[in-house]
Image (tube, helix red, strand yellow):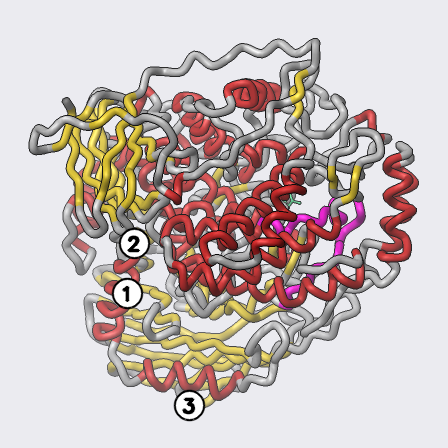
Amino acid sequence: MKSVFIISLLSLSTNCFAQKKEDLKLWYNKPAGAVWENALPVGNGFQGAMIYGNVDTETIQLNEYTVWSGSPNRNGNDLCLDSLAEIRQLIFDGKRKQAEELANKTIISKKSQGQMFEPVGSLHLTFNESEKYTNYYRELDISKAVQQTTYMIDDVTYKREVIASFPDKIIVMHLTASKPKSISFTAYYSTPQPNATTKASSNELSISGTTIDHETVEGKIKFKGIAKFKLDGGSLSSTDTSLTIKNANEVTIYISIATNFKNYNDISGDENAKANSFLTRAYSKTFSQILPAHIAAYQKYFNRVELDLGTTDAAKLPTDERLKDFDSADDPQFVALYFQFGRYLLISSSQPGGQPATLQGLWNNKLYPPWDSKYTININTEMNYWPAEKTNLPEMTEPLIKMVKELSVTGVKTAKDMYGAGGWMAHHNTDIWRINGGVDGAFWGLWPNGGGWLSQHLWYRYLYNGDKKYLESIYPVLKGAAKFYDDYLIEHPKYNWLVVCPDESPENAPAAHQGTSLDAGVTMTNQIVFDVFSAAIDAAKILNKDKAFADTLKEKRSRLAPMHIGQYGQLQEWLDDVDNPNDHHRHISHLYGLFPSNQISPYRTPKLYSAAKNTLIQRGDVSTGWSMAWKVNWWAKMLDGNHAYKLIRNQLKPVGTGKGVNYENGGGTYNNLFDAHPPFQIDGNFGCTSGITEMLMQSEDGDLNLLPALPDVWQSKGSITGLRARGGFDVVSIVWKDGKVIKTVIKSNLGGNLRLRVPNEVKMSDGAGLQKAGGENTNPFYQTEKIAEPIISEKAKITLPDLKQTFVYDITTEKGKTYTLVLK
Ligand code: FUC
């Protein structure tokens, strides 16, 4: 019965795909109802929409990337510099609570705590059709970026297709029916925006307004949305705020939205002119012209990677049922779908010329969204971009790179005025106005390393593309991030290392520290400063400049605190051995050194690797969505595919709907496959896509490591095509069987040594043998810094890793050549 149903559904679709493409759909046999987390997202980086697919009243909830509360502003605290010496002294004297009280007054902003990414409103289409429909079907085809809803009433089949067109920069809905004159509905907007009005005239329905004030900052974004209706047959009438369509054969709705935003410092744009220009260009085209151009533009990115983990009968079920069953079912394809959904979301929410993906990507329906749906840069924004380079979506990093460049401008004054330092800095949050003051309270917001961490993403990009011109363009950002720490580090009076103070390990505090997070020389910061200095030193060398500055950084880098292994065999989060082995806090920031950084390695730093493993075990698996996603990456780095897979299972746990903000019971996944912190937070989607990649390929640890963490459930066979590795290597394909690489094709875009680590012996496809790896890897993009020996507590029990045998080869590659290796 079920398969008959599915076949009939497939035949409803206008397009015929190969079986493989059919796998790349989220589909449901019921509408979203009133639940936003059941609706399906489309986006082109500029406009986003959530489509509910309700039969009686369709809702298209609309977002535009620059609709934010507030206006250009700065939020530093001028009292900081004068209180800095006192705060530092209090921390060094162990009077952390007093330091926190003072920092709340002098470091935390008294102005904006960050502005909010805002919804525009929703376009509703009321059909007045009874609930008598049959054959209901709703899908999001992520191989094409097309949402579709179909149903039957009496003997008429209705179809609605929605896209957020990439080339045309508008949202389009196309409504058709199997019988002429069957389409009748009334269209109108609703919006939570208090300063918005809607208007209907001829065949247009518009919404315009100004965003709200928030926390001392006046709302000045003017937005304009225009929905223009093109009818085939039928009639159209209007009231002041609605349009009624009667007996049309076909309707196409073109939705254009724009604002007066030009950049973080300039809102002199003309929202009406912009919205109209997108609309006019698109309106002259039919849906059948817009659709293929949209699909082609999307597939240019999406089709670069294919993941095949096998498909079972479980894949025939609707997506919500697969989610419900995932823990007990044999459904490897669901992981592939989830992996690709992460790529879909990144392409849809982060396009060149746009803004970076927020905490919710490009999809928010609330006037006061959780954490403002802005940018939390003590993990969440960085996590959004982990999959970009390696899953072959480097273009999607452009908005992030632009944001960091802008922060490196606005952050100069913050560094100078607040900390008396050169360079630039940002605390733990930013927004579209590129604020970088401390927000929310010193416990969370004093953390001064948002700029340092973000700057590494610009460096990573170079490690993938090897483009010196690009490096030249980002060098000032890297140098400025290093300069801030160069000026700001001070000598710890007890330990004599150079430390950042005041500081904190993001959002966590040990009991021994009087319930406050404030500290000096915390592990994560030492690791970040180490990376910031190393990137600036390397970049200066490659570009042949700033030798004296690089020498200073080298000297200071050698005086940073080494990592410590504490009494429970754990990697210490703080300089003092105060970790609690029962602490299950979601932030495990000191494992930044394991991933995304490469300071902790099974091969190069086995003691630290073992300590990191103890920490991971002590912190436990259950946590918020993004925290579990980070753990997938960490367990992949631990070369433990089964544990990484366990975390994927935890993450693909249905959480139902409407849970509010919850830190305690573990995250999971909503029916539309959005990650649940809870609430919805997109970082978990992106983090898990990155983690799945890290299970299959890693390139951060001095070699290109294939199948480093393949779980038992994926051993028998599988393949992935189109990944990218550092050093300009396209990992064209990896094909495996029984846990062994049976074939891999690697293209070298930059030349240089390819140090390849594989779980079994391989040879060239022409039969030629390979040279065993030896000595340093000569490839400049695979250089790893020497890590200082850890300081180890006498009580610590450290079991050195018993690593699975791998085979490591050195292959001298030529630029532009492709190498095919097969099982030996
Ligand atoms: C940090 C995290 C929270 C949440 C928020 C957006 O504050 O600790 O869990 O992800 O960012």
Front-most of residues 353 and 2: 353
Task: Note whether ligand 1 is within 8 Å of mark 2.
Answer: no
Dominant secondary structure of the residues highlighted in magenta in the image: loop
Marks 2 and 1, Cα distance to the nearest angstrom? 9 Å
Q: Residue at x 47, y 14 (%)?
A: 801
Kind of residue indicated by mark 3: Ser
Marks 2 and 3, Cα distance to the nearest angstrom? 39 Å
Q: Residues within 10 Å of mark 1 (few under 14, many from 20)?
A: some
Instruction: Name the residue that disc number 3 marks.
Output: 202
Q: Earlier in the sequence, mark 1 or mark 3?
A: 3
Q: Between label 2 and label 3, give the one nearer the viewer.
A: 2
Instruction: Name the residue that disc number 2 marks.
Output: 302
Instruction: Name the residue that disc number 1 marks.
Output: 297
Marks 1 and 3, Cα distance to the nearest angstrom? 32 Å
Q: Residue at x 90, y 57 (%)?
A: 82
Q: Residue at x 65, y 73 (%)?
A: 211
Front-most of residues 146 and 732: 732
Residue 751 relative to residue 279: left or right: left
Q: Earlier in the sequence, mark 2 or mark 3?
A: 3
Q: Earlier in the sequence, mark 2 or mark 1?
A: 1
Front-most of residues 553 and 612: 553
